[in-house]
Image: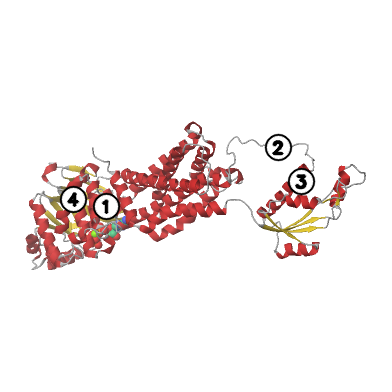
């Protein structure tokens, strides 16, 4: 593949097959450093599968991928990745703090680093008051916020966020996006999946996935123009219908 | 210096346990409970067995004129009244009926003219037959029946000795190991392995099924943690817990049951730690077969029964049918039970139990690799 450092994420022909079923089908993706890329698409489109392959959690059936200039899968890169899974994936029997600190230690942070970062993150996800509450006693949206904090504790330059805003109230979602903009300003690359179109319009570029394939890609404005629609929502419905026809 | 990453996993499991009071109680109270239940119930001593005594013998004039000798009375006085609870009964049929009704386990009949017959025999009078004491016995309870027979034989032997009749040959047993050992001394090394194996396997199994279903396992694998770090983190946690559990068992054994320990306790604990490593790896392996946490319960019999039956915890390997015995060597606790017994009761050192240690190390190596591999397979 070309000059490795040009893109934070670069895939070519990324494919995942489960038996005869193809979940991701020859996916080519390029995301530049400091870009917020929104991966959209209906349930079962292959968004989670794509992210899992990139994070080394699923073996790719075909194709190749580079992250931050390194060919993956490669364990070396994992300390520079932040991954927030779609499911909450927290230790319910631990407190919010204990969960966050666990990931801090896993990434080899010192106690002071963990404490400093955690204080900031809890403030950002508005959970300072709930720091020492067991996760099992938190609401669904709160759990998602803890999960996001866990993914950010080691300040990774590349973030994979799989539906980070599910179940999060509108006010907080808005502040999430402010924070993502802040991260982006600091040079962090973010690949984010979402079903909220208002969030999609926040992205620098969006890709629309369907049946494992990328059927449209561009800035939100480009997508609107191409589909001749007034909202992203309408644009994707139009794109889907067109794809069905073919 | 940076702590190895797997210690983060170890620490996390300990925190989880600290927050989870019920599991914590299981870890520390279960060994105590098991020790008392098994220690007391299996102490192996039969006590207070009700026995009817029908004495039809009237005695005979003794060597000193004017005295009467009664062999039954002498025999009865030699019976340990803690073991047998003796009740006099004049009528033989009534006594046998008691046994039939289940009110007594045995009836002893001293026939008429017993003493006279024995005296005649001792004096070498012609025509004197063999003296016989009859025992009507409920043999359906083997342990109790054996205890009654043994007690009666013992009492007869002692009575003959008192009368100056020595048996021509006697056995003098000299303890090479385990002088004065009771069942509990044999049992404690076994229960240590049993408790540690069982709890470690089940706890790892449960927490690992949790890791799989909640997605935390996948999440960990997206960090710099490798499969082997995770297995390692669990192994360290559970060997520490295993050592603590065994120490509790040993403390109760020493303080409450006054067990004999002639060897190096630390060596025994090392063996137990090894067993814990093997057990947790087994737990991780099994976890790949469970889809939900509730399915874990189905694994219980398959984990506990083979070890219960085959590992020589409650009875020696020699008591296991010979065709089954090869399977004993396939369950890891067999080796730790054997090694701990040798260390604690015989005072053996590493140079004598190395075979068991090598066996456990081999199990550990195989199970750890399989557990690590089972985590990799999931990538599909
Ligand atoms: N282990 C598996 N075996 C077989 N098929 C699978 C497996 N995992 C995922 N799939 C299939 O792959 C397809 C893509 O799933 P994926 O989770 O990537 O979708 P998604 O785009 O993230 O959807 P959602 O918006 O619902 O999160 C789905 O049709 C799913 O059924
Ligand atoms: Mg998904």
**Residue A47 lies in what quarter of the image?**
bottom left
Which of pointers 3 and 2 lies earlier in the amino acid sequence? 3
Give SS at disc 3: helix
Q: To which chain does the residue with label 3 belong?
A: B
Mark 4 C-beta to ligand 2 under 8 Å: no
Mark drawn on residue B159: 3
**Residue B145 lies in what quarter of the image?**
bottom right
B258 or B340, which is in the foreground? B258
Q: Gap in Å between the C-alphas at discs 3 and 2?
A: 18 Å
Q: Gap in Å between the C-alphas at discs 4 and 3?
A: 82 Å
- Does B243 sit left or right of B156 as displayed? left
Residues at discs 3 and 2 both on one chain: yes
Give SS at disc 1: helix
B307 or B314, which is in the foreground? B314
Mark 3 C-beta to ligand 1 under 8 Å: no
Marks 1 and 3: in contact by CB < 8 Å? no
Figure quadrant of the C terminus of chain A: bottom left
Q: Nearer the viewer, mark 4 or mark 3?
A: 3
Q: Gap in Å between the C-alphas at discs 3 and 1?
A: 78 Å
Marks 3 and 4: in contact by CB < 8 Å? no
Q: Nearer the viewer, mark 3 or mark 1?
A: 3
- Does A22 sit left or right of A207 as displayed? right
Q: To which chain does the residue with label 1 belong?
A: B
Marks 2 and 4: in contact by CB < 8 Å? no
Q: To which chain does the residue with label 2 belong?
A: B
Query: Label 2 belongs to which residue?
Result: B171
Query: Label 1 belongs to which residue?
Result: B219
Residues at discs 4 and 2 both on one chain: no
Mark drawn on residue A115: 4
Residue at 40% in and 46% down: B244
């Amino acid at each position: 593949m070309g000059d490795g450092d040009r893109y934070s994420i670069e895939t070519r022909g990324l494919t995942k097959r489960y038996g005869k079923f193809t979940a991701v089908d020859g996916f080519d993706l390029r995301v530049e450093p400091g870009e917020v890329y929104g991966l959209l698409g209906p349930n079962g489109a292959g968004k989670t599968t794509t992210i899992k392959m990139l994070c080394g959690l699923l073996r790719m059936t075909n194709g190749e991928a580079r992250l931050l200039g390194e060919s993956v899968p490669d364990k070396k890169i994992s300390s520079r990745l932040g991954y927030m899974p779609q499911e909450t994936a927290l230790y319910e029997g631990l407190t919010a703090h204990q969960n966050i600190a666990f990931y801090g230690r896993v990434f080899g942070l010192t106690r002071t680093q963990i404490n400093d970062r955690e204080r900031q993150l809890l403030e950002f996800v508005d959970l300072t008051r709930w720091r020492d509450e067991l996760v099992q006693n938190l609401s669904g949206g709160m759990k998602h916020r803890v999960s996001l904090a866990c993914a950010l504790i080691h300040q990774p330059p590349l973030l994979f966020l799989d539906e980070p805003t599910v179940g999060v109230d509108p006010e907080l979602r808005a502040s999430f996006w402010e924070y993502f903009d802040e991260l982006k300003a600091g040079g962090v690359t973010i690949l984010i999946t979402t079903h909220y179109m208002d969030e999609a319009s926040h992205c620098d570029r969006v890709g629309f996935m369907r049946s494992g394939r990328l059927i449209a890609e561009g800035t939100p404005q480009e997508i609107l123009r191409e589909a001749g629609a007034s909202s992203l929502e309408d644009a994707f419905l139009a794109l889907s219908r067109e794809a069905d026809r073919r | 210096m940076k702590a190895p990453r797997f210690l983060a996993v170890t620490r996390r499991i300990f925190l989880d346990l600290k927050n989870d009071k019920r599991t914590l109680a299981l870890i520390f109270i279960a060994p105590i409970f098991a020790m008392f239940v098994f220690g007391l119930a299996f102490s192996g001593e039969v006590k207070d067995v009700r026995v009817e005594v029908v004495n039809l013998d009237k005695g005979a004039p003794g060597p000193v004129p004017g005295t009467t000798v009664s062999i039954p009375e002498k025999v009865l006085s030699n019976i340990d009244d803690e073991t047998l609870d003796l009740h006099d009964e004049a009528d033989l049929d009534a006594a046998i009926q008691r046994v039939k009704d289940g009110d007594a386990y045995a009836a002893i009949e001293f026939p008429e003219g017993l003493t006279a017959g024995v005296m005649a025999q001792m004096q070498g009078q012609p025509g004197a037959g063999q003296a016989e004491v009859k025992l009507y016995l409920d043999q359906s309870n083997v342990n109790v029946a054996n205890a009654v027979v043994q007690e009666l034989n013992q009492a007869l032997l002692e009575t003959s000795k008192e009368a100056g009749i020595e048996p021509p040959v006697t056995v003098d047993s000299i303890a090479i190991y385990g002088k004065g050992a009771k069942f509990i001394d044999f049992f404690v090394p076994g229960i240590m392995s049993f408790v540690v194996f069982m709890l470690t396997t089940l706890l790892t199994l449960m927490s690992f099924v949790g890791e799989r279903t909640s997605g935390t396992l996948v999440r960990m694998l997206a960090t710099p943690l490798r499969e082997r770090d995770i297995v390692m983190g669990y192994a360290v946690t559970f060997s520490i817990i295993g050592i603590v559990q065994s120490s509790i068992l040993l403390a109760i054994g020493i303080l409450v049951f006054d067990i004999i320990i002639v060897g190096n306790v630390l060596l025994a604990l090392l063996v137990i730690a090894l067993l814990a490593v093997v057990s947790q790896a087994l737990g991780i392996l099994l976890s790949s077969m469970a889809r939900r946490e509730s399915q874990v319960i189905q694994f219980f019999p398959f984990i506990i029964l083979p070890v219960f039956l085959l590992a020589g915890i409650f009875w020696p390997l020699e008591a296991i049918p010979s065709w089954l015995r090869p399977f004993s060597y396939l369950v890891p606790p067999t080796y730790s039970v054997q090694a701990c017994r040798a260390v604690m009761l015989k005072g053996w050192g590493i140079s004598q139990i190395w075979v068991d240690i090598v066996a456990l190390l081999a199990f550990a190596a195989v199970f750890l690799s399989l557990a690590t591999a089972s985590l990799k397979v999931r990538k599909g």
